[in-house]
Image (cartoon, rainbow, N blue to C red):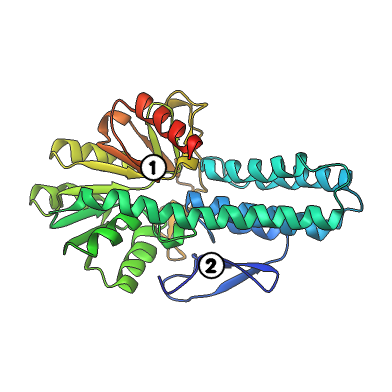
Amino acid sequence: MPFKTIEWKNNTVRLLDQTLLPNEVKYLPIADEKAMWEAIRMLRVRGAPAIGVAAAYGLYVGVARTKPKNLKAFKRTVEKVAAYLATSRPTAVNLFWALKRCVNVASLMCEDTTVSAAHAELLAEAKRIHAEDFQTCELIGAHGAPLLTGCNGVITHCNTGALATAGMGTALAVILKAAEKTCFTVFADETRPLLQGARLTAWELQQAGVETRLICDNMAGSVMKRGMVQAAIVGADRIAANGDAANKVGTMPLAIVCQFYKVPFYVAAPLSTFDLKLKSGDEIPIEERSAEEITTFGGRSVAPRGTQVFAPAFDVTPAKLIAGIVTEVGVLRPPYKRSIAAAFHRKGRS
């Protein structure tokens, strides 16, 4: 893609401000952990893998800003800044995964490690997380592309491309890889209430030269009834040990419609998005957003003043509705408890 969502440049981290897309392409320099917390919370950077990468860099710049005088103070600061960044959003498990990796690196530093060397190692870990996600996206795309062979139309929800990761994406990576060999139309749900499908996915696919048709979320059933799509593929922000997957709200209804019309519904996500501590999706914490995201549109009120709102940012698709989960180690199939466990075993041996 002709842009980078996150980049480390001139000793600072820069984020592509996704709240301004598609009308303006602007990069934000992030100088401290408070700026990164705000960027994550306000969706300037979004998508589970991208949030993880951003948090790792945010931890580094936050610790560097405080200038700890010795290793003990350095480790305390790492834990404090990580705990603060972890409060930015509750559902995307990659946030906590990346922060835990960085905290572990700090905790294992030898007593004779200098503060300068400690800073360098913390930054190196953030860069490793960044590079690993780039490679993971490539693998997800390669493993998932054959699933779309022979399709005339594919439907997706929210945004799962380069804007949501440090690479070419998760579900969108599958679509882009498949589009290299197969001509099909991508039907992109607009994804209310913040229009990630309209503002971001349609923009990314346009940049990549892939034929795209934007639809309202509630048009998916009509598209399937007309036989215009043969597969659905989405991303995930957290996947439980049984395969239940949390993703942007509206994903679960899409999966239900897919089941009715016998359209295979796939999820694409790195293993870092799996939370094996959770037995099922019932245990996944679901973020609730502000009422204004629903009661206003384009800066204008669209609901009566005082209207009560329920605004979950995510819903959970039951594993029984998912035909396959595309990961960097391959496509996982039901029964998911077994295939997920096997995937982590393969990952651990690689």
Compared across the picture, whether 15 is left or right of 294 comes to right
Q: Taking 244 as reference, is 189 left or right?
A: left
**Looking at the image, can residue 195 be seen?**
no
Report x, y in % for residue 153: 16, 56
Going by the numbered disc 2, the residue's amino acid type is Asp
Tell me: residue 35, above or below residue 22.
above
Q: Residues within 10 Å of mark 2 (few under 14, many from 20)?
A: many
Element under disc 1: loop
Q: Residue at x 44, y 30 (%)?
A: 240
Separation of marks 2 and 1 at Cα, in angstroms: 31 Å
**Residue 207: % across, % down:** 34, 73
> In the image, what residue occupies the spot 29% across and 60% down?
177
- The percent position of residue 230, horizontal first and vertical second, equals 14, 49
Outermost front residue = 349
Mark number for residue 17?
2
Q: Amino acid at mark 1?
A: Val
> Where does label 1 land, which residue?
329
Q: Residue at x 29, y 62 (%)?
A: 176
Quadrant that contains the N terminus:
bottom left
Which numbered marker is on residue 104? none
